[in-house]
Image (spheres, rainbow, N blue to C red):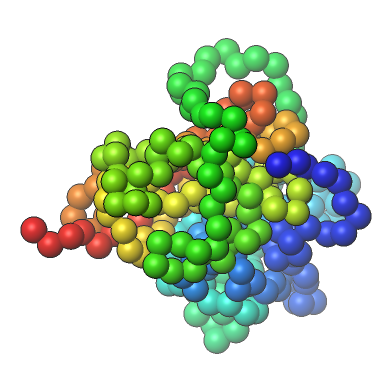
Amino acid sequence: MTAAATSIPSRFDSVTAVTSDGSGRLCATIDPQWSIAGRTNGGYVLALMGRAAVEAVAVDREAAGRPPLPHPIAASATYLSPVPVGPVLLDVAVLRAGRTQTATRVTLTTPDGEVRAEALVTCAALARDGEPLHDGVAPAELPAPERCVRLTADGPGFEVSIMGVLDERLDPSCLGWVEGRPSGVGELRGYLGFADGRAIDPLALLLAVDSLPPATFDLGLGGWVPTLQLSAWVRDVPAEGPVVVRQRARLVAGSLFDETCDIWDSRGRLVATGHQLAGIRMPRA
């Protein structure tokens, strides 16, 4: 897994590209490969809305003679209905424009006018800071990448197309559910990078917080897990190389569950955290 430089735009940059329609709205196209069982990945949608926020803020700040704020440091999206493949429109409203941070609201609609998702995105300029004053998150422990299992597009009974563009390698010790032997812990761990070598940057971290299979698979619960709400906090610019991702189920009850996702870069620094509330189909008693 490398982060090799290339003059050809990466797939991630292409599928999150936004353009102006001339009226103040931004346009984009949802790519079919960034999906699970034909359903668009929530992290991909969050990254697309994050890019729309960054682009809109850059235009506003350039007009005011201010430097851009290129990184989404906090993003929280509510998914109202599945986002279909094809063209979408993104409306970005600036809620507060500060000197070092700008808060926005991004609304994603389909051409028929239906609102599919809405997000609050805060943009800033991150820098690799010194050692943190306090870090209370225990780091994930993983075997070397070559000893981990790379996931493919052939999922457990359905196609996981997004694995064709991601380089995702899970710790074998948390893959018992693949053979019908879930551990019952509710935790998945692994390495994440892009298949084309693109570096993981702050924008890509919005995708990364929703990139692993649901942690409920390790509880023996399968099936579609629709994301209802997804939040991400980006704390640092990742160092070069794949990131380490640990996803843990917190509470599974009724028809809902929530999970937390922590991400470390190759230096061992915690660079992002995600929280998700999702629907789940519970087995009959």
Judge left or right: residue 181 versus residue 72.
left
When the figure is inspected, residue 169 is found, relative to residue 116, above or below; the finding is above
When the figure is inspected, residue 213 is found, relative to residue 16, above or below; the finding is above
Which quadrant of the figure contains the C terminus? Answer: bottom left
Residue 42: percent from the left, percent from the top?
51, 60
- Residue 11 position by quadrant: bottom right
On the question of residue 201 being in view, the answer is no
* Residue furthest out toward the right: 7
Judge left or right: residue 122 versus residue 222.
right
- Residue 94 position by quadrant: bottom right
Residue at x 77%, y 70% (from the top left corner): 19
Depth order, front residue of 114/282: 282
Residue 172: percent from the left, percent from the top?
45, 39
Depth order, front residue of 192/67: 192
- Residue 183 position by quadrant: top left
When the figure is inspected, residue 139 is found, relative to residue 83, above or below; the finding is above
Residue at x 70%, y 62% (from the top left corner): 16
Which quadrant of the figure contains the N terminus? Answer: top right
Residue at x 43%, y 69% (from the top left corner): 158
Residue at x 65%, y 79% (from the top left corner): 87
Residue 225: percent from the left, percent from the top?
36, 60
On the question of residue 159 being in view, the answer is yes
Residue 58: percent from the left, percent from the top?
79, 52
